[in-house]
Amino acid sequence: GKTLLSVALALHMAKIYRVGYYSLETRTKKLVDRAMATMSQVPLSDIKERHFSSQDWAAMSQAAVAYAKLTLDHVDAAKMTVADISSRALSLRHQVVFVDYLQLISGPGASAYERVSNISRDLHLMAQDLGITVIALAQLSRETKDKQGRLIPPSMSDFRDSGQIEQDADVALLLWPEDPDDYRSDRILKIGKNKEGTKGKITL
């Protein structure tokens, strides 16, 4: 659910700021479909299959008008490095950059740990040097369960490939399904780290 959550955040922030959504995994068309589903409340499955009622068409039309007013750029970032993202963000004057997701960025390193650590540090420096907000999505380690089969919620140490991600982040959000066996279940969103405020969790 991290891409869906980040798209919703990007749509909200693009009402005020110039936002760049750099996707290394999901193509622009699919991101726009998700954006339309979020803004129109028409189910994504109906949008994919182009099954619309008259009410859906009206909702989609209103959503399209609202979407056109946003300052949001979708950037296909496959094979991009942090330097590539930084250069594009400068040229497009992005104030907020979303990266989906960190572990797919190209970069040097003798191992996955070293590569991801370097990428995390470079994104942190990019945010500081350019004075922009960088929201980087990252994979977590595979979910684990206790002896009773209950999901053990992820922690800050579960960022995959490198603990450097935890160190570089000003704010870290952890997202997981309440019931891992039911994809329709609620999601739990936990603020695992917050340098400037409180921590806690909510149900989505």
Image (cartoon, grey):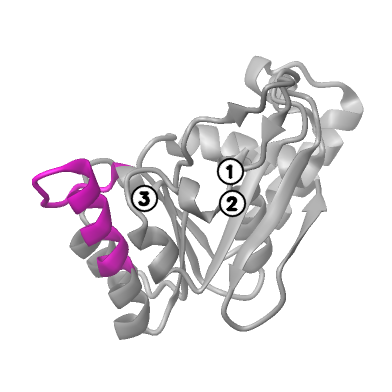
Q: Nearer the viewer, residue 153 or 10?
A: 153
Query: Are the residues at dot 1 and dot 2 in contact (C-beta closer than 8 Å)?
Result: yes
From the image, give the main secondary structure of the stretch colored magenta. Answer: helix
Mark 1 lies on a secondary structure that is helix
Q: What residue sits right under mark 2 in the picture?
A: 6
Expressed as whole percent of the image width and height from the top left, the position of residue 93 reads 38, 75
Q: What residue sits right under mark 3 in the picture?
A: 102
Can you see residue 69? no
Residue 143, located in which quarter of the rendered image?
top right
Expressed as whole percent of the image width and height from the top left, the position of residue 86 reads 27, 68
Q: Nearer the viewer, residue 125 or 162?
A: 162
Amino acid type, label 2: Ser
Can you see residue 165? yes
Q: Earlier in the sequence, mark 1 or mark 3?
A: 1
Amino acid type, label 1: Lys
Q: Earlier in the sequence, mark 3 or mark 2?
A: 2
Mark 2 lies on a secondary structure that is helix
Give the residues in magenta: 104-123
Mark 3 lies on a secondary structure that is helix
- Whole-angstrom CA distance, mark 3 to mark 2, is 13 Å
Who's the residue at 91% across and 30% down the image? 55
Q: What residue sits right under mark 1 in the picture?
A: 2
Residue density around tag 2, few if under 14, some if 14–19, many if 20 or more, within 10 Å: some
Expressed as whole percent of the image width and height from the top left, the position of residue 79 reads 21, 42
Queried whether the magenta region covers residue 120, the answer comes back as yes
